[in-house]
């Protein structure tokens, strides 16, 4: 199945730059014939695998910012519930175009702006960013890193810290999302588990690449990838389903 071949590179992107999972739901719709809701639910289950692998891998190499990631999660978890409630009110096309603008805009800004000194967000700011990311992730139906990575890079947080924190923050978000989809019978656990194992292997490889590219090189790679994913998100709402 073609979608299985996509799982490993998706995992590599997730482990290396924090994002990439946004490719999986449309692939499940177009290549595996799943409906939109089942594709989203199955992807959420798959991302639990990549989140666990990514969090463990960064933690083993003392690269996981536990305190910072915890503050982000503290803000994200309750805000995600509010975002889910608003989801049905805003047109899906508007949501995707907003997400595309944030992603591509942040990537372009980080590519062409003058290098800035790395900074650490104070605790209240980290909780606030987590709340924005949690709300936006639930609103758009995406995993946390899709919004977290562009926001933190734009705020001057080091790339490796940003990517590692993205692995951690996605766990509660996709966990609750999976429960919600499962309650509606919209999770293909068998396919999602196979995809999760394959994507998890890719995530492990991606974390190794990220550690080798740490610093300004990783920052530029992540920024360029954001521009590419942003472009993909711009056209996604208009592709045939």
Image: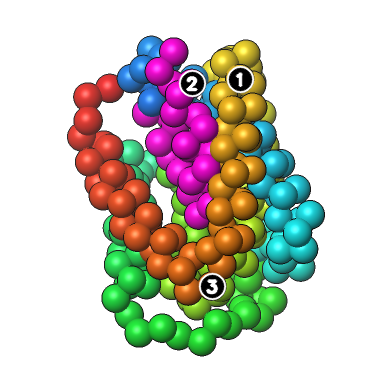
When the figure is inspected, residue 193 is found, relative to residue 64, above or below; the finding is: above
When the figure is inspected, residue 57 is found, relative to residue 29, above or below; the finding is: below
Q: Tell which circle, 1 or 3, labels the residue nearer the N-terminal end.
A: 1
Residue under label 1, please give it: 194
Dot 1, how many residues are within 10 Å of its Cα: few (below 14), some (14-19), or many (20+)? some
When the figure is inspected, residue 38 is found, relative to residue 154, above or below; the finding is: above
Q: Nearer the viewer, mark 1 or mark 3?
A: 3
Q: The residue tagged with tag 3: helix, strand or loop?
A: loop
Q: Report the disc number at residue 215.
A: 3
Question: Which colouring convention does the figure follow?
Answer: rainbow
- Chief secondary structure of the magenta span? helix
Dot 2, how many residues are within 10 Å of its Cα: few (below 14), some (14-19), or many (20+)? some
Residue under label 2, please give it: 4
Residue 224 part of the magenta-drawn span:
no
Label pair 1/2, CB-CB below 8 angstroms: yes
Q: Tell which circle, 3 or 2, labels the residue nearer the N-terminal end.
A: 2
Identified at 40% across, 67% down, the residue is 220
Q: The residue tagged with tag 1: helix, strand or loop?
A: helix
Residues drawn in magenta? 1-26
Q: The residue tagged with tag 2: helix, strand or loop?
A: helix
Residue 4 part of the magenta-drawn span:
yes
Q: Quadrant of residue 235?
A: top left
Identified at 33% across, 20% down, the residue is 30
Q: Tell which circle, 1 or 2, labels the residue nearer the N-terminal end.
A: 2
Give the quarter of the figure containing the C terminus: top left
Left or right: residue 116 versus residue 121 is left
Label pair 1/3, CB-CB below 8 angstroms: no
Dot 3, how many residues are within 10 Å of its Cα: few (below 14), some (14-19), or many (20+)? some
């Amino acid at each position: 199945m073609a979608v299985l071949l996509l799982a490993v590179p998706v995992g590599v992107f997730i482990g290396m730059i924090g994002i990439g999972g946004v490719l999986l739901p449309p692939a499940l719709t177009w290549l595996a014939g799943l409906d939109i809701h089942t594709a989203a639910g199955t992807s959420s289950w798959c991302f639990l695998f990549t989140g666990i692998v990514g969090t463990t891998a960064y933690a083993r190499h003392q690269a996981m910012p536990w305190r910072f990631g915890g503050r982000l999660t503290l803000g994200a978890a309750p805000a995600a519930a509010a975002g889910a409630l608003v989801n049905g009110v805003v047109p899906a096309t508007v949501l995707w175009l907003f997400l595309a603008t944030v992603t591509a805009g942040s990537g372009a800004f980080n590519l062409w702006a003058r290098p800035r000194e790395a900074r650490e967000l104070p605790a209240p700011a980290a909780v606030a960013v987590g709340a924005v990311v949690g709300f936006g992730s639930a609103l758009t139906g995406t995993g946390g890193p899709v919004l977290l990575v562009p926001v933190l890079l734009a705020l001057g947080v080091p790339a490796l810290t940003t990517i590692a924190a993205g692995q951690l923050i996605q766990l509660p978000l996709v966990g609750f999302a999976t429960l919600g989809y499962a309650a509606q019978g919209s999770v293909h656990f068998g396919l999602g588990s196979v995809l999760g194992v394959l994507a998890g292997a890719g995530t492990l490889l991606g974390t190794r690449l990220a550690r080798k590219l740490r610093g300004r090189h990783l920052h530029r790679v992540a920024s360029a990838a954001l521009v590419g994913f942003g472009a993909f998100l711009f056209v996604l709402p208009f592709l045939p389903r």
